[in-house]
Amino acid sequence: DQQVKQNSPSLSVQEGRISILNCDYTNSMFDYFLWYKKYPAEGPTFLISISSIKDKNEDGRFTVFLNKSAKHLSLHIVPSQPGDSAVYFCAASVNSGYALNFGKGTSLLVTP
Amino acid sequence: EPEVTQTPSHQVTQMGQEVILRCVPISNHLYFYWYRQILGQKVEFLVSFYNNEISEKSEIFDDQFSVERPDGSNFTLKIRSTKLEDSAMYFCASGEHSGNVNEQYFGPGTRLTVT
C-alpha cells in the first residue's frame, strides 16, 4: 500500500539550474512531511521538513512546498550543484513521534 | 555535530541464527526507531521506542524481532531466528520531537546478509 508516492525514479538537471522533486500522498491524516537525501552505503540524511499548517518552508537552497488540497509536496533545490546528486526520499507521518512512511525515492543527477 | 552510530556495519549470519544490531542514538533524543530497506525497495518502518517501551510497530515486526535499551546509551534490535528475507539494510534513527516536529536522524545502517 503506497501511501507516499514518488513517481519519477530519476531526474537529471544541469548545474546551476533548479531541481524540482515531487511527491504525492494518499493518507489525509499525514500532518508532517520530510525530505531526506541518501548517498549509496549511507543512511538517509535529513534535509528539510514542513508541518501541515504551513505551505512553504525554506532553508538555504532548499524549499519545500505543500499543497494539502492536492496532497502534493515538492522539493526545490536552487541552484543545483553536482554534490546534490543523490537519491531523495519524501516521507510523511501522522503525528509527532510516529512512524515515517517513505516514498521509493528519486535519483537526482546534477551534471556540470 | 552529534550523530547516530550503528555497529556492525556489515553482519553475515546463517539462516536460523540470532543477530543483534546495535545503535547509539543522539544523546538528548528520547524517541528511537528501527527501519529497514531491502535492496531495491523503499525504507520501511519497523518499530518505535519511547520511555522504555514500544510505542508503535509495523506488521514486519513480528515475534522474531525485539528491541531493548539495555543502558542509557545503546538501543538494540534482535532478530531471534533469521530468515533469508531478513537480508536488508537496517537503519536506526532517533529524534527529540519537541512540539509537533518529527525530524528523525538516521545512522549509517547495518547491512545484514542471511545465508
Image (spheres, coloured by chain):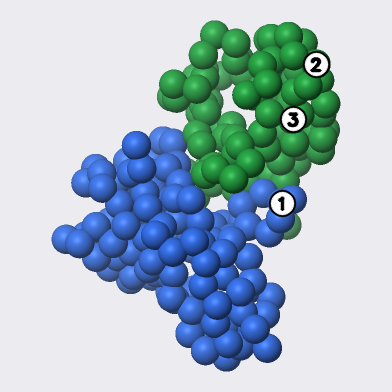
Chain colours: A blue, B green
Q: Position of residue A102 (x, y in %)?
A: 46, 46
- Determine whether the residue tagged by mark 3 lies in a helix, strand or loop: strand
Residue placed furthest toward the left: A69
- Mark 3 belongs to which subunit? B
- Determine whether the residue tagged by mark 1 lies in a helix, strand or loop: loop
Question: Which residue is at 36% across, 49% downward?
Answer: A4
Which amino acid lies under the numbered mark 1 shown in the image of this protein? Answer: Glu
Q: Position of residue A65 (x, y in %)?
A: 34, 70
Question: Which residue is at 30% across, 52% downward?
Answer: A25
- Mark 2 belongs to which subunit? B
Q: Position of residue B6 (x, y in %)?
A: 76, 37
Tell me the quadrant of the picture where the C terminus of chain B can be found. top right
Pick the front one: A19 or B15: B15
Write down the quadrant of residue B94 in the picture.
top right
Write down the quadrant of residue B26 in the picture.
top right
Tell me the distance, in whole angstroms, between the alpha carbons under discs 2 and 1.
24 Å
Which amino acid lies under the numbered mark 3 shown in the image of this protein? Answer: Leu
